[in-house]
Image (cartoon, rainbow, N blue to C red):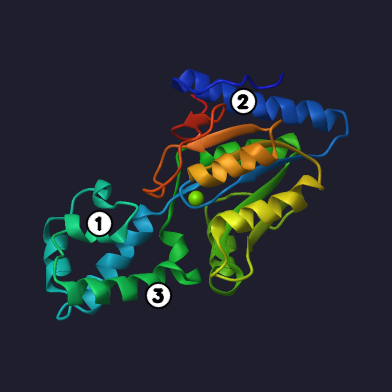
Amino acid sequence: MRPSNQAVKNPAAQARQLAGVTALIRERTAGNKSTLAIFDLDGTLFDNRTRTIFILREISEKFCEKVPQLSRAFETFQALSIVDYSLDVTLGRMGVKHPAETAFIKQEWAKRFFSDEYQKYDMPILGAKAYVDSVHKAGATVIYLTGRDVGRMLVGTTEVLRLYGFPVGVAGTMTIVKKEFEQDDELFKKEVSEYIDRLGEVVAVFENEPANSNILQARFPQAASFFVLTQHRPDAPALNRGIRKIKDFRLK
Ligand SMILES: [Mg+2]
């Protein structure tokens, strides 16, 4: 069954469309055909807000003299919803207003956030592990396509995928990261998609950034294109028609 080309309006529709992808993969595999499913990581398979909170907590303890406003915020910290896409907004919500303190926190946060060591504090999106597993077992090659970079984040990326039980490093999987951190995310995904196109039939694409979602949908118009409703850039373009919105990866 080919998944229908409609937006997801309720959990049952989400489940049906996600299951439609695995059914199509099984069909192709039975016909000895190669299929590919592309998954972004940050904001798609993983919720990064936990990584940020863990890092801010660490900064507040390690440098408590230098970050009094942040330290105070943790006396009453209650919910992850305080974490915004923008660290500036998050710090503002936490009552960190002093420019020197903000600048110091941002510098320490970036050192940690973009590093191998802290990725294990990400939290998988609900149902993500089971769904990626089902796509892999159905016979598709699972491609983790992420804007993280080789030098600072590949080891941590592999480690965290393994830690949470995602298929990684084995036949039928591929991890594609950026060579250089400075590379533009959208340009990177555009260029890589040309390579992926030569490997086989892309049946599904999962993203949380509207710009990337639009680029990949245009590149792979036959694939089911899914947009995960987590966090994304505030200045993002509108999502193109035909891209299905999903809350998470649960099938019931
Ligand atoms: Mg992302």
Mark 1 lies on a secondary structure that is helix
Which amino acid, by three-letter code, is at mark 2?
Ala
Mark 3 lies on a secondary structure that is helix
Residue 197 position, x and y percent, is: 77, 45
Res 90 label? 1
Q: How crowded is mark 3: few (under 14 residues within 10 Å), some or many (20 or more)?
A: few
Whole-angstrom CA distance, mark 2 to mark 3, is 39 Å
Residue 142 position, x and y percent, is: 68, 46
Q: Which residue is drawn at 55% across and 46% down?
A: 212
Residue 1 position, x and y percent, is: 72, 18
Res 157 label? none
| Mark 2 vs mark 3: in front | 3
Which amino acid, by three-letter code, is at mark 1?
Thr
Please tell me which residue lies in front, 14 or 195: 195
Whole-angstrom CA distance, mark 3 to mark 1, is 17 Å
Q: Residues within 10 Å of mark 2 (few under 14, many from 20)?
A: some
Res 111 label? 3
Sequence-wise first label, 3 or 1: 1
Q: Mark 2 points at which residue?
A: 19
Which amino acid, by three-letter code, is at mark 3?
Lys
Q: Which residue is drawn at 70% across and 21% down?
A: 2
One can see residue 162 in this view: no
Sequence-wise first label, 2 or 3: 2
| Mark 2 vs mark 1: in front | 1
Q: Give residue 200's quadrant in the image.
A: top right
